[in-house]
Amino acid sequence: MKFLKQLFAIDKSPRKGLMPVEWVMMAYLLATSVMIMVTYTSLLHPGLMIGIRVQALLVTMALWGVYRLMPCRLTTLFRIIGQFSLLSLWYPDTYELNRAFPNLDHLFAGWEQTLFGCQPAIVFSQVLDWPVVSELVTMGYISYYPLFVGVSLFYFVWRYDRFERATFVILASFFLFYVIFIFLPVAGPQFYFKAIGIENVSAGVFPDLKDYFGKLEFDVLDPQFSLPIPGYADGFFYHILEFTHNAGERPTAAFPSSHVGVTVVAMWLAWESRNRWLFYTLLPFAVLMFFGTFYIQAHYAIDAIAGIFVGTAMYFLLRYSYNFIKKIG
């Protein structure tokens, strides 16, 4: 009952302007809108991309209006949920923008070969092809969304005084990753290896595809564009991964791994919450997530390693920049 009362209690000092994470989204929207205008004639779906931005703007302003009518914890939560829901639109959008730049997979695959003497994205799933391993790492990979949403909800229920900052750190980290993905077009093994042929991968030959993905009218449902997902094809978690992959995967966002990076951000927040039960409950999923990124061939191993360092840097950067951005609103 106490929680329900708090949920609907009117804020004593309601926020008049936008939340920090909404300002970050607006900045991203504006910057990428300028990119669309500059590259309009070379884009495949510029009208759809503009429509996404109009939709994001309308959703954000509508939820701000609801909060202004009833400023309380519940409507604050609605504003955050709205920004989380828009992530499904922003991610595939990076592919539409980064296709204007030449593909860089040949560099990353080459560095991977030099560092490990092989391609872990190929070897790992072949050596550890047992169903139990496949299901565990696949479960870890798809636990990505429940993990950062779960940390956000934990803060909302038990650490509400830091809820807005925690969700800002998570959501703003997504936008920083999206900026990287736009200017660093790396498709990942599942798309690059399919394009160059496994025989080249086996021989350690990694051709420069230049604007191959830029010219491609990409349809992820067509198997000619990506390698089949390795692992136990009859597994429960495998089927979930296959569904999500077919729903929105694109040849983009490989380096650094945002799955690993955002998970690291969430783990730092779990540690900051001082609730060790939360941290140690999520830790096994985070470890499986790390290995799952290249087990399912979505990433190179160096993508996952970089995700740890980039995610940590983003956590501290965004944690300390929150108060500055908050003053804007």
Image (spheres, rainbow, N blue to C red):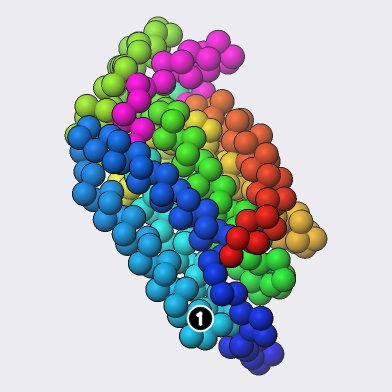
Q: Specify whether residue 142 is in view.
A: no
Q: Residue at x 47, y 73 (%)?
A: 64
Horizontal relation, residue 269 to residue 216: left or right: right
Q: Majority secondary structure of the magenta segment?
A: helix
Horizontal relation, residue 18 to residue 51: left or right: right
Disc tally is 1
Q: Which amino acid type corresponds to the residue marked 1 in the rendered image?
A: Arg
Asked if the stretch drawn in magenta spans residue 327, the answer is: no
How would you rate the neighbour count of disc 1 (Cα within 10 Å): few for under 14, some for 14-19, many for 20 or more? some
Q: Which residue range is magenta in the image?
A: 97-121
Q: Position of residue 207 (x, y in %)?
A: 35, 11
Q: In the image, is residue 184 above or below residue 328?
A: above
Q: Position of residue 58 (x, y in %)?
A: 35, 67
Q: Residue at x 28, y 51 (%)?
A: 50
Q: Quadrant of the N terminus?
A: bottom right
Q: In the image, is residue 43 above or below residue 172?
A: above
Q: Residue at x 42, y 62 (%)?
A: 85
Q: Specify whether residue 60 is in view.
A: yes
Identify the residue position indicated by label 1 in the image. 68
Local secondary structure at mark 1: helix
Q: In the image, is residue 250 above or below residue 61?
A: above
Quadrant position of residue 97: top left
Q: Position of residue 220 (x, y in %)?
A: 26, 40
Q: Residue at x 21, y 43 (%)?
A: 45
Q: Quadrant of the C terminus?
A: bottom right
Horizontal relation, residue 18 to residue 163: left or right: left
Extreme residue toward the front, this view: 328
Asked if the stretch drawn in magenta spans residue 111, the answer is: yes
